[in-house]
Image: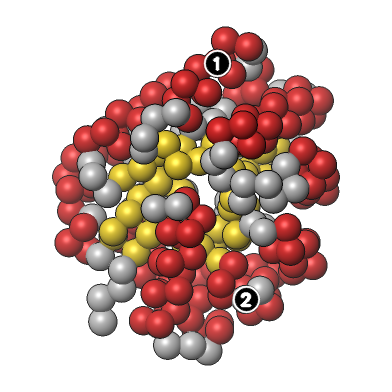
Amino acid sequence: MKLKIFDTHAHYDDRAFDGDRDEVLGSLPEKGVAYVVNVGASLEGVKAAAALADRYSFLYSAAGIHPDDAGCMNGDVMAFLEEMCRREKTVAVGEIGLDYHWNRETHEVQKRWFAEQLHLAKEMDLPVNIHSRDAAADTFQVVKEEHGGATGGVIHCYSGSAEMAGEYVRMGYYLGIGGVVTFKNARVLKQVVKEIPLEHLVTETDCPYLAPEPFRGKRNTSANLAYVVRAIAEIKEEDPEKTGEILFENARRLYRI
Protein backbone atom coordinates (compact mmCIF):
# COMPACT_ATOMS: atom_id res chain seq x y z
CA MET A 1 0.00 0.00 0.00
CA LYS A 2 1.35 3.40 -1.03
CA LEU A 3 -0.25 6.38 0.68
CA LYS A 4 -0.62 9.79 -0.97
CA ILE A 5 0.80 12.31 1.50
CA PHE A 6 0.24 16.00 2.13
CA ASP A 7 2.64 17.58 4.64
CA THR A 8 0.85 20.70 5.88
CA HIS A 9 3.77 22.07 7.92
CA ALA A 10 7.47 21.66 7.12
CA HIS A 11 10.68 23.65 7.50
CA TYR A 12 12.97 22.54 4.68
CA ASP A 13 14.77 25.88 4.91
CA ASP A 14 16.14 24.73 8.30
CA ARG A 15 19.91 24.34 8.54
CA ALA A 16 19.41 20.63 9.27
CA PHE A 17 18.87 20.21 5.51
CA ASP A 18 21.83 22.33 4.36
CA GLY A 19 23.90 19.27 3.42
CA ASP A 20 21.34 17.46 1.25
CA ARG A 21 18.26 19.66 0.80
CA ASP A 22 17.86 19.09 -2.95
CA GLU A 23 18.39 15.37 -2.58
CA VAL A 24 15.76 15.09 0.16
CA LEU A 25 13.18 17.24 -1.62
CA GLY A 26 13.81 15.57 -4.95
CA SER A 27 13.13 12.15 -3.45
CA LEU A 28 9.77 13.00 -1.86
CA PRO A 29 7.42 12.49 -4.84
CA GLU A 30 8.60 8.93 -5.38
CA LYS A 31 7.84 8.26 -1.71
CA GLY A 32 4.21 9.27 -2.09
CA VAL A 33 4.50 12.92 -1.00
CA ALA A 34 2.26 14.91 -3.33
CA TYR A 35 2.28 18.30 -1.59
CA VAL A 36 4.31 20.10 1.07
CA VAL A 37 3.71 23.51 2.61
CA ASN A 38 6.97 25.01 3.82
CA VAL A 39 6.10 27.39 6.62
CA GLY A 40 7.96 30.62 7.27
CA ALA A 41 8.77 31.50 10.88
CA SER A 42 11.19 34.43 10.60
CA LEU A 43 11.89 37.09 7.99
CA GLU A 44 14.62 34.95 6.48
CA GLY A 45 12.44 31.87 6.76
CA VAL A 46 9.61 33.52 4.86
CA LYS A 47 11.99 34.45 2.03
CA ALA A 48 13.54 30.97 1.98
CA ALA A 49 10.14 29.26 1.96
CA ALA A 50 9.05 31.32 -1.03
CA ALA A 51 12.29 30.54 -2.88
CA LEU A 52 11.83 26.80 -2.31
CA ALA A 53 8.24 26.97 -3.53
CA ASP A 54 9.48 28.59 -6.73
CA ARG A 55 11.89 25.68 -7.31
CA TYR A 56 9.62 22.70 -6.63
CA SER A 57 6.21 22.28 -8.25
CA PHE A 58 4.79 20.25 -5.33
CA LEU A 59 5.98 22.70 -2.68
CA TYR A 60 3.98 25.71 -1.45
CA SER A 61 4.78 28.31 1.20
CA ALA A 62 3.25 30.15 4.14
CA ALA A 63 4.30 33.63 5.28
CA GLY A 64 4.28 34.70 8.91
CA ILE A 65 6.42 35.57 11.90
CA HIS A 66 6.72 33.09 14.78
CA PRO A 67 6.03 34.50 18.28
CA ASP A 68 9.68 33.99 19.25
CA ASP A 69 10.54 36.62 16.61
CA ALA A 70 7.64 38.98 17.36
CA GLY A 71 10.07 41.63 18.58
CA CYS A 72 11.13 42.31 14.99
CA MET A 73 7.61 43.27 13.97
CA ASN A 74 6.67 46.75 12.77
CA GLY A 75 4.80 48.37 9.93
CA ASP A 76 7.52 47.61 7.39
CA VAL A 77 7.51 43.92 8.30
CA MET A 78 3.73 43.79 7.98
CA ALA A 79 4.00 45.41 4.54
CA PHE A 80 6.59 42.80 3.57
CA LEU A 81 4.33 39.97 4.74
CA GLU A 82 1.43 41.43 2.77
CA GLU A 83 3.62 41.47 -0.34
CA MET A 84 4.64 37.84 0.23
CA CYS A 85 1.01 36.84 0.76
CA ARG A 86 0.21 38.06 -2.75
CA ARG A 87 2.55 35.50 -4.28
CA GLU A 88 0.78 32.78 -6.24
CA LYS A 89 2.19 29.90 -4.18
CA THR A 90 1.66 31.45 -0.75
CA VAL A 91 -1.25 29.48 0.68
CA ALA A 92 -1.41 30.64 4.32
CA VAL A 93 -0.36 33.20 6.92
CA GLY A 94 1.90 31.38 9.35
CA GLU A 95 3.53 30.27 11.44
CA ILE A 96 1.94 32.71 13.87
CA GLY A 97 0.72 32.43 17.44
CA LEU A 98 1.92 32.43 21.03
CA ASP A 99 4.85 30.70 22.73
CA TYR A 100 5.08 30.99 26.50
CA HIS A 101 7.64 28.19 26.81
CA TRP A 102 10.72 30.24 25.97
CA ASN A 103 9.16 33.68 26.56
CA ARG A 104 11.63 35.26 24.16
CA GLU A 105 9.19 38.15 23.78
CA THR A 106 6.69 39.50 26.30
CA HIS A 107 3.18 38.09 26.22
CA GLU A 108 1.75 41.46 25.24
CA VAL A 109 4.12 41.82 22.29
CA GLN A 110 3.30 38.30 21.14
CA LYS A 111 -0.45 38.84 21.40
CA ARG A 112 -0.32 42.18 19.59
CA TRP A 113 1.46 40.83 16.53
CA PHE A 114 -0.46 37.57 16.55
CA ALA A 115 -3.65 39.62 16.26
CA GLU A 116 -2.16 41.82 13.53
CA GLN A 117 -1.23 38.76 11.46
CA LEU A 118 -4.68 37.24 11.97
CA HIS A 119 -6.09 40.49 10.57
CA LEU A 120 -3.69 40.22 7.63
CA ALA A 121 -5.02 36.73 6.88
CA LYS A 122 -8.55 38.12 6.72
CA GLU A 123 -7.45 40.96 4.44
CA MET A 124 -5.62 38.55 2.13
CA ASP A 125 -8.34 35.86 2.39
CA LEU A 126 -5.79 33.23 3.39
CA PRO A 127 -6.06 30.49 6.04
CA VAL A 128 -3.85 30.70 9.12
CA ASN A 129 -1.24 28.30 10.51
CA ILE A 130 -1.22 28.73 14.28
CA HIS A 131 1.55 27.91 16.75
CA SER A 132 0.68 27.53 20.44
CA ARG A 133 3.07 26.33 23.14
CA ASP A 134 2.27 26.56 26.85
CA ALA A 135 -0.27 29.22 25.89
CA ALA A 136 -3.46 27.29 25.16
CA ALA A 137 -5.95 29.61 26.87
CA ASP A 138 -4.52 32.86 25.51
CA THR A 139 -4.13 31.41 22.00
CA PHE A 140 -7.75 30.32 21.94
CA GLN A 141 -8.93 33.71 23.21
CA VAL A 142 -6.97 35.68 20.59
CA VAL A 143 -8.05 33.35 17.79
CA LYS A 144 -11.71 33.55 18.81
CA GLU A 145 -11.72 37.34 19.20
CA GLU A 146 -9.50 38.34 16.27
CA HIS A 147 -10.19 35.66 13.64
CA GLY A 148 -13.08 33.43 14.69
CA GLY A 149 -12.56 30.99 11.84
CA ALA A 150 -12.99 33.75 9.23
CA THR A 151 -10.63 32.29 6.63
CA GLY A 152 -10.08 28.86 8.17
CA GLY A 153 -6.76 27.43 9.19
CA VAL A 154 -4.92 24.82 11.21
CA ILE A 155 -3.81 24.59 14.82
CA HIS A 156 -0.27 23.37 14.25
CA CYS A 157 1.07 20.49 16.32
CA TYR A 158 -2.10 20.40 18.39
CA SER A 159 -1.31 19.73 22.06
CA GLY A 160 -4.41 20.91 23.93
CA SER A 161 -7.36 19.09 25.43
CA ALA A 162 -10.07 17.22 23.56
CA GLU A 163 -12.57 19.80 24.82
CA MET A 164 -10.62 22.72 23.36
CA ALA A 165 -10.07 20.74 20.16
CA GLY A 166 -13.83 20.52 19.81
CA GLU A 167 -14.12 24.29 20.21
CA TYR A 168 -11.57 24.91 17.46
CA VAL A 169 -13.33 22.47 15.17
CA ARG A 170 -16.66 24.20 15.76
CA MET A 171 -15.03 27.43 14.58
CA GLY A 172 -13.91 25.67 11.42
CA TYR A 173 -10.22 24.98 12.09
CA TYR A 174 -8.30 21.80 11.39
CA LEU A 175 -5.94 20.17 13.88
CA GLY A 176 -2.39 19.41 12.76
CA ILE A 177 -1.30 15.89 13.77
CA GLY A 178 2.33 14.82 13.49
CA GLY A 179 4.85 12.35 14.81
CA VAL A 180 3.88 12.85 18.46
CA VAL A 181 0.75 10.75 17.89
CA THR A 182 2.99 7.69 17.50
CA PHE A 183 4.65 8.19 20.90
CA LYS A 184 3.59 5.81 23.66
CA ASN A 185 3.16 8.66 26.18
CA ALA A 186 0.92 10.78 23.91
CA ARG A 187 -2.25 9.81 25.78
CA VAL A 188 -4.04 13.17 25.49
CA LEU A 189 -3.30 13.59 21.78
CA LYS A 190 -4.47 10.04 21.05
CA GLN A 191 -7.71 10.86 22.84
CA VAL A 192 -8.10 14.00 20.74
CA VAL A 193 -7.60 11.99 17.55
CA LYS A 194 -10.13 9.43 18.77
CA GLU A 195 -12.80 11.99 19.60
CA ILE A 196 -12.44 14.55 16.79
CA PRO A 197 -13.94 13.53 13.43
CA LEU A 198 -11.32 12.53 10.85
CA GLU A 199 -12.63 15.25 8.54
CA HIS A 200 -11.08 17.88 10.84
CA LEU A 201 -7.54 16.45 11.02
CA VAL A 202 -4.52 17.01 8.77
CA THR A 203 -1.02 15.55 8.80
CA GLU A 204 2.20 17.51 9.34
CA THR A 205 5.84 16.90 10.17
CA ASP A 206 7.26 20.16 11.55
CA CYS A 207 10.40 18.67 10.00
CA PRO A 208 13.24 18.45 10.76
CA TYR A 209 11.62 18.03 14.20
CA LEU A 210 9.21 15.56 15.81
CA ALA A 211 9.99 12.43 13.81
CA PRO A 212 7.55 9.59 14.53
CA GLU A 213 8.40 6.21 15.95
CA PRO A 214 10.54 4.35 14.96
CA PHE A 215 12.64 7.42 14.02
CA ARG A 216 12.06 9.47 17.17
CA GLY A 217 14.99 11.80 17.85
CA LYS A 218 16.25 11.68 14.26
CA ARG A 219 15.80 14.21 11.47
CA ASN A 220 12.24 14.13 10.20
CA THR A 221 11.04 14.34 6.59
CA SER A 222 7.66 14.33 4.90
CA ALA A 223 8.09 10.69 3.86
CA ASN A 224 7.67 9.70 7.52
CA LEU A 225 4.06 10.84 7.50
CA ALA A 226 3.08 7.34 6.39
CA TYR A 227 3.65 6.31 10.02
CA VAL A 228 1.43 9.13 11.25
CA VAL A 229 -1.38 8.17 8.87
CA ARG A 230 -1.21 4.56 10.04
CA ALA A 231 -1.25 5.64 13.69
CA ILE A 232 -4.34 7.78 13.11
CA ALA A 233 -6.02 4.90 11.27
CA GLU A 234 -5.26 2.55 14.14
CA ILE A 235 -6.71 4.95 16.72
CA LYS A 236 -9.79 5.46 14.55
CA GLU A 237 -10.03 1.72 13.79
CA GLU A 238 -10.22 2.54 10.10
CA ASP A 239 -8.49 1.33 6.94
CA PRO A 240 -5.12 3.15 6.54
CA GLU A 241 -5.58 3.76 2.82
CA LYS A 242 -9.05 5.25 3.25
CA THR A 243 -7.81 7.28 6.24
CA GLY A 244 -4.95 8.60 4.13
CA GLU A 245 -7.31 9.66 1.36
CA ILE A 246 -9.50 11.63 3.76
CA LEU A 247 -6.51 13.32 5.44
CA PHE A 248 -5.12 14.24 2.03
CA GLU A 249 -8.37 15.82 0.87
CA ASN A 250 -8.70 17.68 4.18
CA ALA A 251 -5.32 19.32 3.56
CA ARG A 252 -6.27 20.29 0.03
CA ARG A 253 -9.41 21.99 1.34
CA LEU A 254 -7.47 23.70 4.12
CA TYR A 255 -5.00 25.28 1.70
CA ARG A 256 -7.37 25.49 -1.30
CA ILE A 257 -5.02 23.52 -3.54
Quadrant of image for the N terminus: bottom left
Element marked by disc 1: helix
Q: What type is the residue that disc 1 sits on?
A: Ala
- Residue sitting at 55 percent across and 84 percent down? 236
Query: Around disc 1, counting alpha carbons within 10 Å, would you say few (fewer than 14), some (14 to 19), or many (20 or more)?
Result: few
Query: Around disc 2, counting alpha carbons within 10 Å, would you say few (fewer than 14), some (14 to 19), or many (20 or more)?
Result: few
Residue situated in front as seen by the camera: 240 or 100: 240
Is residue 217 something one can see in this rendering?
Answer: no
Element marked by disc 2: loop
Q: Count how many numbered circles sit on residues in the image.
A: 2
Is residue 54 something one can see in this rendering?
Answer: yes
**Left or right of 218: which side holds 148?**
right
Q: What type is the residue that disc 2 sits on?
A: Pro
The spot of residue 85 in percent (x, y) is 48, 30
Q: Pointer 1: what residue?
A: 79
Residue situated in front as seen by the camera: 206 or 185: 206
Q: Is residue 76 above or below residue 241?
A: above
User: Gap in Å between the C-alphas at discs 2 and 1?
Assistant: 38 Å
- Residue sitting at 28 percent across and 59 percent down? 34
Say the numbered circle drawn on residue 197: 2
- Residue sitting at 77 percent across and 38 percent down? 146
**Left or right of 109: which side holds 97?**
left
The spot of residue 201 in percent (x, y) is 56, 66
Q: How is the image coloured?
A: secondary structure
Location of residue 195 (image quadrant): bottom right
